[in-house]
Amino acid sequence: MANCYFPDATVTTSWTKGPASAYLNNRNRLPEASEEGVILVRYSPPIVHQNNNNKRAYAELPITANRWVKVNGEEAVLTSYMRLIYRVESREGVWKITDLTTINEDDTLAPAISGTDLHINPEDLKGLRHSYRFLSYVRIKAVGKVRDDELGIDRPESVEKVYQELEEWIKGSEK
């Protein structure tokens, strides 16, 4: 996977922010990231926006990620719906990723065994951002804190700014 990224590439996800090398080596994890559970990711077909004149493109890749976690002592499945945004460019005839950014759309949390009570106090969900509410809840329960500045569709002005920057970038403006 490392060969897909240029050495100066960056990655911003819910658990890492920084050089792609740290992401690829599972370093640079944000402190609120939980180490629990397996993650199963389902990818949708990408939408690619390309400018052949300057050999730049970005691809939007909708995904659904399921993660099995413990919630208040019970096994649960956290499902996240996101868009991965890959900036790619051709350097010396080779196309690679220069940036990966995620946009949170929604998430759900359900017991892994139907009928199990996850003992969630609705008051604990107040103030958590809709686009990643249950991811936040799980992380707060695990380690006590969560970032509130992630990209999410509940803050459309931030998402629109990303798309404006992407369009400028593929036309030749820098990041």
Image (tube, grey):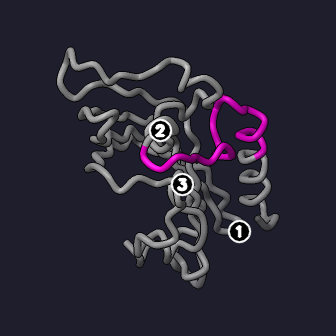
Element type at marker 2? helix
Which residue is found at the position 64% from the left and 68% from the top?
A: 55
Crowding at dot 2, Cα within 10 Å, few <14 / some 14-19 / many 20+, comes out as many
Element type at marker 1? loop
Three-letter amino acid code at the position of disc 3: Thr
Magenta segment: does it hold 150? yes
Give the x, y percent position of residue 129: 62, 31
Q: Earlier in the sequence, mark 2 or mark 3?
A: 3
Crowding at dot 3, Cα within 10 Å, few <14 / some 14-19 / many 20+, comes out as some
Element type at marker 3? loop
Label 2 close to label 3 by CB (< 8 Å):
no
In the image: residue 123, left or right of residue 173: left
Give the x, y percent position of residue 19: 58, 74
- In the orientation shown, which residue stands out farthest toward the top? 115
Which residue is found at the position 78% from the left and 35% from the top?
A: 157
Marks 2 and 3 sit apart, C-alpha to C-alpha, by 12 Å
Marks 1 and 2 sit apart, C-alpha to C-alpha, by 38 Å
The correct choice, above or below, for 173 with respect to 111 in the image is below
Crowding at dot 1, Cα within 10 Å, few <14 / some 14-19 / many 20+, comes out as few
Residue 54 lies in quadrant: bottom right
Q: Which residues are magenta?
A: 142-161
- Which residue corresponds to mark 1? 54
Q: Nearer the viewer, mark 2 or mark 3?
A: 2
Which disc is residue 13 wearing?
3
Three-letter amino acid code at the position of disc 2: Leu
- Which residue corresponds to mark 2? 135
Three-letter amino acid code at the position of disc 1: Asn
Which residue is found at the position 79% from the left and 55% from the top?
A: 168
Q: Earlier in the sequence, mark 1 or mark 2?
A: 1
The correct choice, above or below, for 99 with respect to 59 in the image is below
The correct choice, above or below, for 47 with respect to 87 in the image is above
